[in-house]
Image: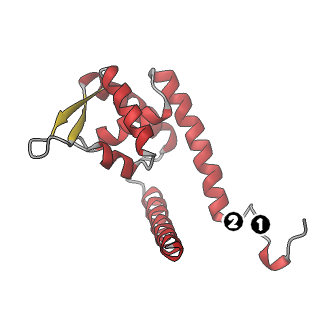
Amino acid sequence: MSTDENTHIDLESFWPYQVIVLADKISRYTLEVVRSEADINQSQWRVLAAIADKPGRTAADVTAVTPMDKTIVSRAVSSLIEQGLVEKTPSQGDKRRSTLETTAAGLKIYSTIAKKLATTLIPSGEGDPSNTEFVRNLKEFSSRMDKINQAQSSSKT
């Protein structure tokens, strides 16, 4: 298959490709840390981290911030509850909704994993200006992608 010179993408300098490669490396490393520190999988870790980050989130909130399929989030929540790492509390105003919180055991696991990840992935510290700038750029690119995806979804309907 030949490629027109005007449409050729140099993967070494194409930032979307490099972000995918980086995300894969981070995911693999995170999985190894999660496996070595706790008896949970990657999905369970992502749910646990989302709940520990903001206690009181609902499963729908977790789905929105992770972003994972709601079925995967539901299974992860159920297994974390079974393991005693998360607890579900029915909402006082709407019994169909429940809020999620980490238990003491869940918070201990979260803290152990989070500390190891922060130490190895952010060696210069979160307050480092280069880290702050990097995160700002990531959020800007993410926002651009949200707009592109919304426009694409709108054009299909």
Tell me the SS state at disc 2.
loop
Is disc 2 surrounded by few (<14), some (14 to 19) or many (20+) residues within 10 Å? few
Q: Residue at x 24, y 26 (%)?
A: 103
Q: Quadrant of residue 100?
A: top left
Residue 131 % position (x, y)? 46, 56
Q: Looking at the image, which residue sits at the far left?
A: 92
Instruction: Evaluate if marks 1 and 2 touch, with contact meaning CB atoms under 8 Å apart.
Output: yes
Tell me the crowding category of disc 1: few under 14, some 14 to 19, or many 20 or more residues within 10 angstroms, Cα based. Answer: few
User: Relative to 141, is 64 above or below?
Assistant: above
Q: In front: 9, or 76?
A: 76
Measuring 42% from the left and 54% from the top, which residue is drawn there? 128
Circle 2: residue type: Phe
Where is 126 relative to 29, above or below?
below
Residue 106, position as x, y percentages in the image:
31, 26
Farthest residue to the front: give it. 157
Residue 48 seen in render: yes
Decide which of 9, 1 is in the foreground and name it. 1
> Which numbered disc covers residue 73?
none
Amino acid found under the numbered disc labelled 1: Asp
Q: Using the image, determine if residue 72 lies above or below residue 112.
A: below
Residue at 13 percent across and 45 percent down: it is 94
Colour scheme: secondary structure
The residue beneath circle 1 is 10
Residue at screen point 20% across, 43% down: 97
In the displayed structure, does residue 141 sit left or right of residue 47? Answer: right
Q: Position of residue 148 (x, y in %)?
A: 52, 72
Which residue position is annotated with label 2? 14
97 displayed left or right of 31: left
Where does the image place residue 51, in percent across and percent down from the top left?
A: 30, 39
Q: Secondary structure at mark 1?
A: loop
Residue in the foreground of this view, choosing between 117 and 148: 148
